[in-house]
Image (spheres, grey):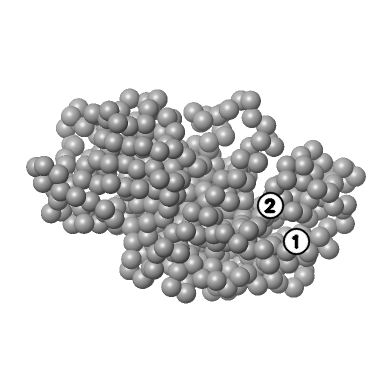
Amino acid sequence: MAAYINSVVVLLLFSAAALLPLIASGQGGFTVDLIHRDSPQSPLYDPTSTPSSRLRAAAARSRERAIYFGRAMRNATLAASDNFYSTVSPNDFEYLMSFYLGTPPTEVLAIADTGSDLIWVQCKPCDQCYTQTAPLFDPQASSTYKVVSCSAQTCSALPQSSCASGSQCEYNYGYGDGSLVDGFLSSETVGFHSTSGRPVQIPSTVFGCTHQSKGTFNKNGAGLVGLGGGQLSLVRQLGSVISNRFSYCLPSDQSSTTKKISVGGQGSVALNPAALANGQGNIIIDSGTTLTILDDNTLQSVSKKVATSVGLPQVSDPNKVFDLCFDVSGAGGNAKFPDITFHFSGDASVVLQQSNAFVESAKNTVCLAFVSNKGNGVSIFGNIAQQNFHIGYDLGAMQLTFAPTDCSNH
């Protein structure tokens, strides 16, 4: 049964080998491939990395992500109708997204980011840009490319813009780590694969043609696809085509409000009541953060309940990431861990089974996959907790759904 959660602020970065089904009204749907950064199919794949090194790196990215979101919340006062522009680090992405741009179509691999709105790619000429592996997009080679004028409504939707020569809408878009992109707001045909086998083309999609960039961008990405809630995001631009809905499913390989968290049959623990924005919500559903991040008091209370529920010896985490770990060497592969339930507002409960809440940090060492935000940032429901749930977003109704499933079959 699906759990329904009303969400005022939804912030996430896609992160694992999965599909993003975008359901088109009455016409089936189309999908976008998302490639996990540690997958052998990813251009970022490092064959010399180990499970421990990947876990340590994921933990570091998770904490940095919480700090960035925390800064955004402190620096912004949101009304229900406001667009939200989160401060994110472009180098800390978890997914690359494949799509087509222009006529004839050019395949583009870019960061998929539901924490921001602007879609952009690096375009020719791009003399002051970070070096990318793929060829730059050439707007002059596309018959459907157009520049957006300064008087266009979409130009005013940018957080910062100016009027260049020829009344072209110029943007200067910044991120939390100081990275910047500068270029011209434009429109172009964007294409995706479809469930019917026929390509889906969306004409006149607004995007940024970047001609200057600096910062921590990775050479394997040609740009960024904003999937947030603002007017310029891909999801908002598709609007009625997808009935303002999209979903994703994360295989187990790698704003809403939580009332409380319960462990097994024990009593519940209340999450810190500090709200995200304007009194709405106290946790971010973020698929770009690997680990679940909680405030110190909540984490300590949950850890105590888990410790009393698990009849195994406790050990220190050799990676120094997690606070609560167990030695499972004597369990013969049959170690049992309690379900952990997040109780969201609206009487919606999401039950995390062992694979969602515990990870193998080292051989014979299994740890609770929750970490502290150390007083910085906010609480985040990470992507390990979201694995093997079909998670749907209805941006029209501002509703989030969780339905248990086997994502390896999607």
Residue 119 placement: quadrant: top left
> Quick check: can you spot residue 158?
yes
Residue beneath label 1, please? 303
Q: Residues within 10 Å of mark 2 (few under 14, many from 20)?
A: many
Q: Residues within 10 Å of mark 1 (few under 14, many from 20)?
A: some
State left or right for residue 132 relative to residue 141.
right
State the residue in front, 1 or 125. 125
Residue beneath label 2, please? 369
State left or right for residue 171 relative to residue 65.
left
Depicted 77 relative to depicted 194: above or below:
below
State the residue in front, 204 or 183. 183
State left or right for residue 41 relative to residue 154.
right
Depicted 10 relative to depicted 136: above or below:
below
Question: What's the residue at 71%, 72% (across, down)?
Answer: 268
Give amino acid for label 2: Ala
Question: What's the residue at 83%, 58% (across, down)?
Answer: 310
Structural distance between the alpha carbons of marks 2 and 1: 10 Å
Give amino acid for label 1: Ser
Depicted 27 relative to depicted 265: above or below:
above
Residue 377 on image: x %, y %: 54, 59
